[in-house]
Image: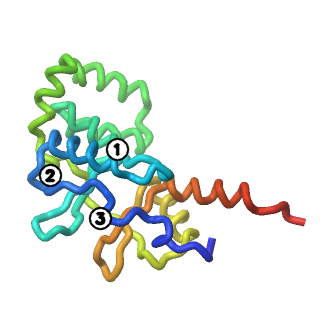
Amino acid sequence: MKSKLVKELMVHLERYPVVPLDATLLEAVEKFERVQKMRDRKRQPFRAILVVDETGHVVGKIGQLAFLKALEPQRNILGDMGKMAVAGVSADFINTMMNHFQFFQDSMADICRRARHIMVKDIMVPIAEHIEEEATLGEAIYKFVALQTLSLMVTRDDKIVGLLRLCDVVQEIADEMKQCGEIK
């Protein structure tokens, strides 16, 4: 794992779907679809949208779970339930709360009409963790496992230059496994 570097597997920032803080969720979806059509078909599809501030610096991302949470008006409670599950609160208790609050009870059309106008700055997940582009694949794997995340922002001189996705790392390892010989 020491020979491959993060920069060899990352998706460069200019190839990733990016929207400004003041974009709506609908604008983010439209941008995501445009970029998805132009992606390298040899790689996994994109599963997130990056959010940039007025200076062009990445400040957050909207992954698939954040997207789904955005559809619920009481989404702040959903985030707390996720923390409760991680903290060991029983699934039965969480299900009882879900039934009590009656999440996602509106029609799909109503949910989507409302979601069109949600601001990405209100639902994005702020960037907390990153990895240097010169880090080894082994260091990246350690971070993925320790942080239980699907992607890591890649930095050069404290500036985000790309995204390292778990799916690309797993594919790289799978390809290597198929090519390497047996240990004798």
Q: Quadrant of residue 112?
A: top left
Q: Which residue is mark 2?
A: 121
Q: Residue at x 32, y 82 (%)?
A: 157
Q: State whether residue 171 is above or below residue 83.
A: below
Q: Quadrant of residue 30?
A: top left
* Amino acid at dot 1: Lys
Nearer mark to the viewer, of 2 and 3: 3
* Amino acid at dot 2: Lys
Which quadrant is the N terminus positioned in? bottom right
Q: Who comes first in sequence, dot 2 or dot 1?
A: 1
In-front residue for pair 38/166: 38
The answer to whether the residue labelled 2 contacts the one labelled 1, judged by CB atoms less than 8 Å apart, is: no
Q: Which residue is mark 1?
A: 83
For label 1, the crowd category at 10 Å Cα-Cα, with few meaning under 14, some 14 to 19 and many 20 or more, is few
- Residue farthest to the bottom? 157
In-image side of 123 versus 90 (left or right): left
Q: Who comes first in sequence, dot 2 or dot 3?
A: 3
x, y (%) of residue 114? Answer: 11, 30
In-front residue for pair 135/179: 179
User: For the residues marked 2 and 1, what is the alpha-carbon distance in whole angstroms?
Assistant: 21 Å
**Element under disc 3:** helix
Q: State whether residue 32 is above or below residue 77.
A: below
Q: Which residue is mark 3?
A: 14
x, y (%) of residue 17? Answer: 27, 54
